[in-house]
Amino acid sequence: MDWVYIVRHGATPWNEQRRFQGQQDVGLNTRGFEQARRLAQLGRPPGEIRIVASDLARAHQTALTLAEGWGTQVEAVDPRFRETNAGSWEGRTFEELGPELARWRTDPYLRPGGGETRVEVGARVVAGISDHMRPGRALIVVTHGGASRAAIGTQLRWDPHDWEQQEVLGNCHWTRLSLESGTWQLHEHNSSTSMSQ
């Protein structure tokens, strides 16, 4: 059985301003670094681990903080773990997007701001996960809220129209899945406790 932990990055200024970050390279704020340090202090997954991350600053900074706290390193950064490309929506507040945002949340095939569909995001993140898995090593993927939701829905083969019912990961929260005989199973979702269990 192989284990994958999907971790959302720590808080950013744009999270607090309720702006659609997409692929804009917004770094962590003080609170985000504190969240990452706290998660590291709670404990790492048991056994051998491999940490990989989105190449966007907020995810990479979170991964580096976890790696430092766990006495290891980030083994790869991969643009496939980036957040949804939301085109012209990026940088706009949720309030500014209004009905457009509501429509996107119910239509997994809508291209926000001319960017990617959620189905496309799920496919690219899952492809990255598959490429970075190693036998006998738990994979820790530090990514983004929308990307994690799309990946989890894709891995579990849920209807994309149902993905929105899945609670989005909080900042520095994580989900644990296993892969056995080609089947993914969800064990924990949106947890902020130790990964050491």
Image: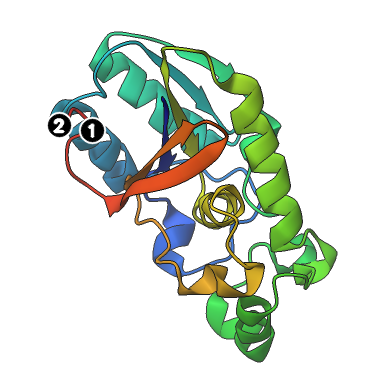
Q: Nearer the viewer, mark 2 or mark 1?
A: 1
- 170 over 107 or under it: above or below: above
**Which residue is disc 1 drawn over?**
195
The single residue placed furthest to the right in the displayed view is: 114
User: How dense is the environment of label 2, judged by Cα within 10 Å: few (below 14), some, or many (20 and up)?
Assistant: some
Q: Secondary structure at mark 1?
A: loop
* Residue 178 drawn at (x, y percent): 42, 35
Residue 162 falls left or right of residue 108 = left
**Whether label 2 touches label 1, CB < 8 Å:** yes
Residue 86 falls left or right of residue 20 = right
Give the image quarter of residue 85.
bottom right
* Residue 111 drawn at (x, y percent): 80, 68
* Residue 57 drawn at (x, y percent): 54, 35
The residues tagged by marks 2 and 1 sit, at their Cα atoms, a distance apart of 7 Å
Residue 61 falls left or right of residue 106 = left
The residue located at (64%, 67%) in the rendering is 160
Residue type (three-letter) at the residue carrying disc 1? Met
Residue type (three-letter) at the residue carrying disc 2? Leu
Q: How many marks?
A: 2
The residue located at (26%, 24%) in the rendering is 45
Q: Pick the residue in front: 117 or 101.
A: 117
**Which residue is disc 2 drawn over?**
42
- 196 over 34 or under it: above or below: above
Identify the coloring: rainbow
User: How dense is the environment of label 1, judged by Cα within 10 Å: few (below 14), some, or many (20 and up)?
Assistant: some
- 67 over 92 or under it: above or below: above
Q: State whether residue 146 appears in this view.
A: yes
Which quarter of the rendered picture does the N terminus lie within? top left
Q: Pick the residue in front: 92 or 134.
A: 134
Which quarter of the rendered picture does the C terminus lie within? top left
Give the mark nearest the N terminus, 2 or 1: 2
* Residue 148 drawn at (x, y percent): 52, 50
